[in-house]
Image (spheres, grey):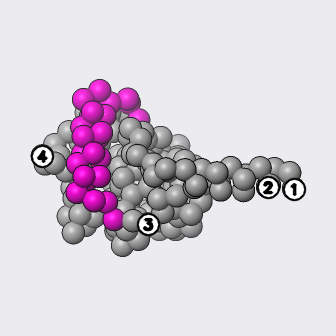
Amino acid sequence: MRKLFILISWAVLVSCGKPSSLSPFTSDGCSLFPDRSLISEIDWCSCCFEHDVAYWRGGTEKQREAADQELKRCVEAKTGDVALATLMYQGVRAGGSPYFINWYRWGYGWGIERQYQALTPQENATADLLFAEYQASPAAVCALGDGQSGGSAASAPGRVFHGNFTQSLLD
């Protein structure tokens, strides 16, 4: 009971403070799920990395749904395993709510008070800048076969998402 009181008190104090700013981008790959197959060469970590970019940035509920659908599509394309892709989709839908106090929630780059909220043009520019800084010296999240760390470096100028993420999330 004491731990619950402390957790609630902490959440109230944090939410009463000034609006938070966006933290530098971080990724842990597939968070609470394996980054790749334990029994074969199949690897879906890059799908999780791209999903982390969307979750770090946050945004609207519609953008979260699009990010989760893109994760499912990407995992299915990389693995050919509909059941695996569906399981991962259901996991992020169940556990990725911005209302949870965890490191992998929607909008984890912001404080917990952010929840679902469209980014302003200034916030989008800040997110673009912070992600560009990450790309300039990325930590190896996913050990990709091409020698690059997580994510592609071929993003369009002013965009932090790659591939289908740009189209589906910024519309």
Q: Which residue is mark 3?
A: 116
Question: Does residue 114 appear left or right of residue 153 in this picture?
Answer: right
Q: Is residue 44 above or below residue 61?
A: above
Disc nearer the start of the sequence (2/4): 2
Tag in front: 1 or 4 = 1
Q: Earlier in the sequence, mark 3 or mark 2?
A: 2
| Residues tagged 4 and 3 counted as in contact (Cβ below 8 A) | no
Amino acid residing under circle 3: Tyr
The range drawn in magenta is 118-141
What residue is shown at x 29% (from left), y 41% (from top)?
131
Residue 91 is at least partly visible in this image: no
Please tell me the numbered disc located at residue 4: 2
Question: Looking at the picture, does residue 100 appear above or below residue 50?
Answer: below
Quadrant position of the N terminus in the picture: bottom right
- Residue contact at pointers 2 and 4, CB within 8 angstroms: no
Amino acid type, mark 1: Met
Residue, disc 1: 1
Judged from the image, the secondary structure of the residue bearing numbered disc 2 is: helix
